[in-house]
Amino acid sequence: MGDHMNTPTSDAAAGFGTGETAPSAITVAVIGLGYIGLPTAAILASNGAAVIGVDVNTATVDAVNEGRVPFAEPDLGVFVAGAVSTGALRAQTGTPPADAYIVAVPTPFNADRSADLSYVDAAAAAIAPQLRGGELVILESTSPPGTTRRMADVILAARPDLSLDGSGGRPAVLFVHCPERVLPGRIMVELVTNDRIVGGLTPEASAAAAALYSRFCQGSIHQTEATTAEMAKLVENSYRDVNIAFANELSVISENLGVDVWELIELANHHPRVNILQPGPGVGGHCIAVDPWFIVAADPENSRLIRTAREVNDAKPARVVASILEAAEGSEAPVVAALGLAFKANVDDVRESPAVAIVRSLAEQRPDIQVLVGSPHATVLPRELAELPNVSIAETDKAIAEADVVALLVDHDVFREIRREQLAGKRIIDTRGFWRAWA
Ligand SMILES: NC(=O)c1ccc[n+]([C@@H]2O[C@H](COP(=O)([O-])OP(=O)(O)OC[C@H]3O[C@@H](n4cnc5c(N)ncnc54)[C@H](O)[C@@H]3O)[C@@H](O)[C@H]2O)c1
């Protein structure tokens, strides 16, 4: 299918807002009011839509109806408070009738790394009885290929009087996948400025979704079909994962060869067509460390590179632990300063964080080692670490002063303020290449 940017033309798009005429009044139900759903609900409400936010969590519903945001995200509070005060946004636990539905519920993975689609199924089951035909049903949750089709199947099985394309005289429902790529911390900016992909089960559905998003999206809106849109999001994160795995593999090989991996990468990157990423202690977060598995599950035989990249990145924390243990050898009752807990620089998010895995494994393997965690952003230990008697949070300078081994696990900007003399006499494990000039 071609790429029609911001030019929805079909009749199905009429009413969802075309950008050429003033957007008409429309009711949008946003299902799931988390990091993705609530900002989307608030921005739509600020752009002429009547928005009903739906969440199974009554505390979230109550917070939104009071104009409050139940999590931290810059500028979101202003949008929510404003939209609630004008009546453009309200929240409830039940799924209402609406012209468009945006589903933004969790899609975590199961123990076997297949996707848990039970939240999507539950949202679809609740939407089905409300439909009359002509509605848009958009899946924004990051999903394995085929999930939009599955959502349509769940809904149409419950509503045999409706169809995908108007066949048999049954009114059509417009099913679309629209992956979300906003960066937490910048969601209210990127919702407006990022390009979007809308992939419908029919071209009419894609056009209608493009019309809806054009109410607030200033980026290009690329129309395609649903499975391509689902794969696009997964491929973006797999691309990052594979490239980071290459750097991480180089870091292990370099250590074995006695080569400085940071210098190696810097030199190789002087080649005009080479751009190797930086290695680290592993890969974390709820996207890059999770989404590639959805591709592997969809075609295990042919996703060898993607699977191996995941395995390479997942193996890196154990390698860091081994290096720390080696550095601690010879110290009686060793103290290790572990600097950073978050999954990436300058955030407090510890989901799937390799730094947490490293601290946990170290402390569990060696109860005689004291681990002092210097964590300027995530200032409370996650439960899995809090229950370990030999792990505690410490102020960064104090942790370094007391340590025999200093392990830099996250490249937070504040750690750049650590002075060379603070590290004098310490054994250093630098997973980010911060202090290579001092080696
Ligand atoms: N957070 C991000 O940065 C990000 C970025 C891109 C994509 N995504 C994807 O977006 C989706 C949502 O992620 P999130 O971070 O907003 O999750 P979240 O956990 O912050 O929010 C999900 C919300 O859905 C609610 N919910 C669960 N089941 C429900 C149901 N049946 N009906 C109504 N509400 C229900 C939960 O109570 C919760 O408030 C996931 O698929 C995620 O992978 C997230």
Image (cartoon, rainbow, N blue to C red):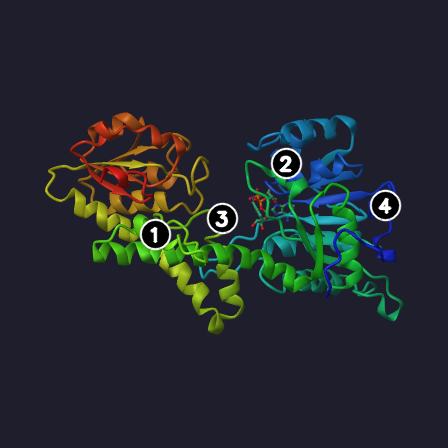
Question: Crowding near pointer 3: few (<14 within 10 Å), some, many (20+)?
Answer: some
First of labels 4, 3 by sequence position? 4
Q: Name the residue under label 4.
A: 20
Quadrant housing residue 187? top right
Q: Mark 1 points at which residue?
A: 267
Look at discs 1 and 2 and give the one toward the viewer.
1
Q: Which residue type does callout 4 highlight?
A: Glu
412 left or right of 160 in image? left
First of labels 1, 3 by sequence position? 1
Q: Nearer the viewer, residue 133 or 83?
A: 83
Indicate which disc residue 286 carries: 3
57 left or right of 293 in image? right
First of labels 4, 2 by sequence position? 4
Q: Which of 435 and 54 is in front in this view?
A: 435
Looking at the image, the residue that sits furthest to the bottom is: 301
Q: Nearer the viewer, residue 54 or 315?
A: 315
Q: Is label 3 within 8 A of ligand 1 (CB to nearest ligand atom)?
A: yes
